[in-house]
Amino acid sequence: MPSYAGAEDFKHDQQARIGVMLVNLGTPDEASVKAVRRYLDEFLSDPRVVESPRLLWWLVMNLIILRFRPRKVARAYASVWQPGGSPLMVHSRAQADALQNELDGHFPDYFKVSLAMRYGNPAIQDVMEEFRQQHCRYLLVVPMYPQYSATTTASIFDEVSRILKSWRLLPQMRMPMHYHDNASYIEALAMSVEASWQENGRGDKLLMSFHGLPQRYHKAGDPYFCECMKTARLLADRLGLEDSAWLAAFQSRFGREPWLQPYFDKTLTKLPASGVKSVDVICPGFAADCLETLEEVAQHDRDLFLKAGGERYHYIAALNDQESHVKMLGELVHNETQTWMVELERYNEPDQSAKRLQLAIKQGAES
């Protein structure tokens, strides 16, 4: 007989809320070999991430990757680790706190914002259990990936669905799949680039680096490449750049099979010979700075460019908890939950008119 999670003495008249779960990829708990191995084991075991025959991949992962790679990755994490944890954790927590404040400023007592990681802690299951205990009858899952991929966004959906299978009372749920062409997102990126140009000067070319994927995923129908290129084009258009003044490429490839091209590192090292000596680099596929942006792009790739003859390399930080980014996330949440908020007003105060909330929604949209 199946058992479904519920409460021993459920209070049917308790106040309901909307749970907003921001989900990013994840991070080791510490910059140690043991913690990194544990994290990589969970991450690389996800069939959404590595689409290979499971037995063969298990052998490769356990006999080769998890034996040798954790030490190298741990050193990389140690080079960017912060007092509050990994950069991804620090910036993601700041985003969640800032979004909570943003929503409370317009709609107090309606939203509970929490951070979850697909791999590692805080685990999606733990955060969703907190929502269940707090009577969140509505659940908005926000993958912090501007561009959709089966390796990221779909994996979050898999995990959320798995957890909900054991719940007695299912929440109403929504999950925006992407925001790669959201006007407020493009504007936030553009403002970040313009602020960097004003403070640090402008390079010969703006490089946009996105995380890579195996080429076969794209051929199988994953829209990630197309959405990355659309983000890049929209940002270039917003900045008024000529085609010769920018380029998009893909980083962080792993293994021997072809990945999405052009490759960022190979493209970067060819630029000085063509006369491009100064570059600005931004990573529009990362909502928060992390190992791949700070250690790989800002440090390792900078060294590659300078050794190849480049003279100036400037990394533009991810949007993190910048005000424009938080406001964009607030708009996204608001747009996805307007009807829920009206329902919630009636649910929590059945004898009250929903006009008050509708007025608040209108005022929030206008502010």
Image: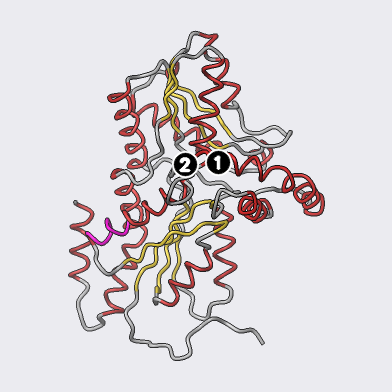
For mark 1, does the 10 Å Cα neighbourhood hold few (<14), some (14 to 19), or many (20 or more) residues? many
Q: Which of the pair 77/355 is nearer the observer? A: 77
Residue placed most toward the observer, 114 or 262: 114
Q: Give the range drawn in magenta.
A: 99-105
- The question of residue 104 being in magenta is answered with yes
Question: Which element is circle 1 on?
Answer: helix
Residue 9 picture location, percent across and down: 44, 91
Q: Position of residue 189 (x, y in %)?
A: 36, 36
Q: Which residue is drawn at 60% across and 44% down?
A: 74
Q: Is residue 348 left or right of residue 50?
A: left
Q: What residue type is disc 2 on?
A: Phe
- Name the mark nearer the viewer: 2 or 1: 2
**Which residue is nearer to you in this view: 343 or 209?**
209
| Residue type indicated by callout 1 | Tyr
Which residue does the image show at 59% across and 26% down from the upper left?
262
Q: Which residue was labeled with disc 1?
A: 224
